[in-house]
Amino acid sequence: MAQFKQYKKTALLFIAPQVIITLIFSIWPAYEALKQAFFFMDPFGLQQHFAGFSNFSHLLDNGFIQALEVTGVMAFFITLITMGLGLMLAVLVQGRGKSQGLYKALILWPYAVAPAVAALLWRFLCQPNVGWLAQGFAMVGIDFNYLTHPLQALVVVIIAASWQQLSYNFLFFFAALKLIPPSLVEAAMLDGASGWRRFWQIIFPLLSPTSFFLLIMNLIYAFFDTFGIIDVLTHGGPAGKTATVIYKIYQDGFINMDLGLAAAQSVIVMLMVMGLTLLQFRYVENKVHYL
């Protein structure tokens, strides 16, 4: 019993730093955001008046619904593009011989670039007057100016974000492919299965744990980590058509200095993320196959 108490004290000693960090940087900010959502506050947070649900009701006419739509579209296409191309590149590179190292290095380079720097690269490429892509579109008669065309701006942001996140998906898929037992693939080859059938009936199901993990990580990336790309490329414009929920919260809280409204949006986002995570683990994980 005494030995158990000694181990318990040691365990608590090791757990305490993480508990303290979680309380300071997660629980306490979440509590403060929940509290601020029910108050009208001055820009400096010195005075506050109880607002009830007024901040939440103002979301309907404040562009929040549009920001939700933009976030959903970006999350869908970024996840689809990065996972699809990442898996395709991983399969192609795995089939290479001595040149695997070179291809891996070239594909992984974009992930070493910070989101803001990646956005600058695409900003130079797509700049309406001197950008290479803009000039190429002009040569074939396409009017390209993502600064004034909402759809073009959204496409540019999706492509830039996907390019920056593609390496992450490639790396995990490539590592997962290495872990698949070659005997399973060889047995299917002996049974006369074609390459396409081997992939869809053997390889792809065994990649489901990695696919499930990347699905969650790509959605989180689309929700939160695209902030730098949006801020550099479009500043949420034109007409708010590229402003995600996180960027909308930043605009309301740090530019317009409406802390109560920003806090209300933060609470909605927190509930959405919690619900999405529960749905994914409740329904999607049931289709995951582990070796």
Image (spheres, rainbow, N blue to C red):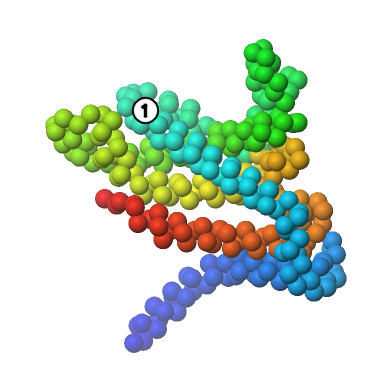
Location of residue 55 in the rendering, given as x and y in whole percent from the top left corner: 75, 64
Q: Residue at x 85, y 64 (%)?
A: 42
Is residue 12 in sight in this rendering? yes
Location of residue 114 in the rendering, given as x and y in whole percent from the top left corner: 61, 39
Q: Residue at x 54, y 50 (%)?
A: 220
Counting the numbered discs, the total is: 1
Mark 1 closeness class: few <14, some 14–19, many ≥20 residues within 10 Å: few
Q: Residue furthest bottom?
A: 1
Quarter holding the N terminus is bottom left
Amino acid at pointer 1: Leu
Viewer-nearest residue: 15 or 137: 137
Q: Residue at x 53, y 67 (%)?
A: 18
Q: Secondary structure at mark 1?
A: helix
Q: Residue furthest top?
A: 139
Q: What residue is shown with label 1?
A: 92
From the viewer's perspective, tell me whether residue 261 is left or right of residue 67: right
